[in-house]
Amino acid sequence: MSDAVRDAWQAIEASPRRTLAQLFAADADRVGKLSARLDWDDGGAIFDWSKTHLDDDLLAAFEELAAARDFAGRRSALLSGETVNTTEGRAAEHTAQRGIGARDSVEEAAQLHHRMHLLVDAIHRGALGEVRHLIHIGIGGSALGPKLAIDALARDSDGGDGALVDVHVVSNIDGLALEQAFAACDPATTMIAVASKTFTTIETMTNAASAIEWLRQAGVNDPYGRVVALTAAPDKAVEWGIDETRVLPFSESVGGRYSLWSSIGFPIALGVGWEAFDTMLAGAHAVDVHFRDTDGRANLPLRAAFADQFYTRVRGCQTRAVFAYDERLALLPFYLQQLEMESNGKRVTANGDPVDGPTAPITWGGVGTDGQHAVFQLLHQGTIEVPVDFIASVAPGDVLDPAHHQILLTNCFAQGAALMAGGNMAADGKDPARAFPGDRPSATILLDDVDAAALGALIAFHEHRTFANAVLMGINPFDQFGVELGKKMARDIETGGGDFDPSTEALLEAAGLSA
Ligand SMILES: O=P(O)(O)OC[C@H]1O[C@](O)(CO)[C@@H](O)[C@@H]1O
């Protein structure tokens, strides 16, 4: 740790500890300072961090930390396509997909998008025969983004006229997942997308082979002719049997968990339309521009990372919760789990030294109001502090009586207020079982609506927040070696090549899997 980083952390640790109530009482303009609106074409969102413990002292100290970690330099390295993923010797060029990056990479992304657009149009026009269903097969970053986007946006799409395609995302190797998709699709009108950056992932390749077999058994003459590959390894896809014209490549420098902007977004374009996919890119671009051009505490992803670092490193919070008060964003917590935990769940710095404190907390969450009736008890009265993000939309997703959406939003805002205020629900205000400690932090992102631009912006905000956290901790968020050991052991078991502990041996034997 450099002296400047150490000094900044000392200032952070030494800054006065005030309760949220004290912070609001001390500063009449607290909301003005810590809640900001970000706009994009036809929409925007409020990012309200005023119910966190950030104050002027802490913000100034965190700005020192950002300077000591050369945040501006790291950001510029990211956005100009430098090799920021040092352990794998690559750039991390997801923003190039949205128009910001090294010129060659931006041009290449635009060309590849154009190619994908042509194929999507051809399918929508019926040039490849009738296509009513798409089974999208991928896992991790090759599935979570498409799944989230389709779940969020397809509800508003007009799939009824046959122009848009009904998409089923299958990730798990458990055959039940694939069977469920088969049951919902007519093989005569189904296409398969095989989405894998590496085109080697065992779950995806096994599921893809079974899908081909399903088509064959249903009488489809040329099952490979019904497959599209979305990959950074086009040669492998061709070798596997997919025609070159239906391989949609993307650059190796786009990380798996950042890949929905690339051809991995093909099912989004097919399921909700090219315009929606393009609008998602535009929403993300608006956040990229804000992230690139805004310094210090006014930079919203960086400000969020200041709060994240404070709760994880200073107050010892081991988890952070995300509750979407909108069914359209029900899958957001799952998406964020991979983004944040696979990126920042590390124990060494970018230089390979042991980290100097805790790294990513566990991201978890769900939807409101469901969570209120299940897990919020712990948030309000449990012994651990959990910073909560609330995400909601002013415009409703439903067309029912407006009472539904009003109750949804009032509950969302009431939860943040209650976590902060605390109090005692007993008539005499003295019953310990009915006491709420309060002073529990939350942040609220209030979108105008959950549309394609907002979804793109929301995801880009979290990508940059994750990156900013990594910079503040001095770690590389773009590798994921932690997933490899378990994969190797599974291969060892399959090939009978491993020597395992007695517990694992006994389990293998019980399941009939011993060598
Ligand atoms: O797209 P691929 O290469 O199939 O990888 C799928 C996922 O597997 C991981 O490599 C983790 O095992 C993720 O990072 C990635 O998103």
Image (tube, helix red, strand yellow):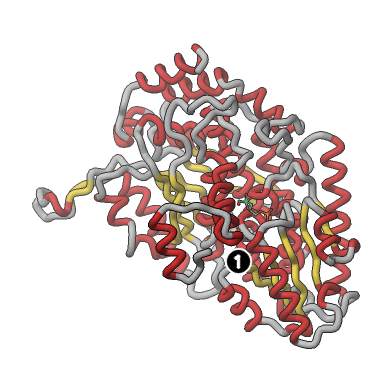
Residue 385, given in percent of the width and then of the height, sits at: 32, 42
Rate crowding at label 1 as few (under 14), some (14 to 19) or many (20 or more) other CA atoms within 10 Å: many
Can you identify the residue that label 1 sits on? 151
Residue 374, given in percent of the width and then of the height, sits at: 33, 63
Residue 117, given in percent of the width and then of the height, sits at: 85, 60
Q: Is residue 173 left or right of residue 436?
A: right
Seen in the picture, residue 192 relative to 20 is either above or below; the reply is below
Q: Is residue 161 left or right of residue 8?
A: right
Q: Is residue 197 left or right of residue 468?
A: right
Q: Judging from the image, what secondary structure is the residue with disc 1 in?
A: helix
Which residue occupies the foreground of this view, 414 or 228? 228
> Could you say which quadrant of the image residue 100 lies in?
top right
Which residue occupies 54% across, 60% down?
Answer: 331
Extreme residue in the top direction? 3
> Could you say which quadrant of the image residue 20 lies in?
top left
Say whether residue 371 is visible.
yes
Q: Is the distance from the Cβ of mark 1 to the nearest ligand 1 atom less than 8 Å?
A: no
Which residue occupies the foreground of this view, 462 or 137? 137
Seen in the picture, residue 96 relative to 489 is either above or below; the reply is above
Q: Is residue 309 left or right of residue 336?
A: left
Please name the amino acid that badge 1 sits on: Asp
Which residue occupies 57% across, 21% down?
Answer: 69
Which residue occupies 71% across, 38% down?
Answer: 92
Residue 324, given in percent of the width and then of the height, sits at: 48, 57
Which residue occupies the foreground of this view, 316 or 187? 187
> Could you say which quadrant of the image residue 427 lies in?
bottom left
Say whether residue 32 is visible.
no
Which residue occupies 69% across, 82% down?
Answer: 185
Count how many numbered circles sit on residues in the image. Answer: 1
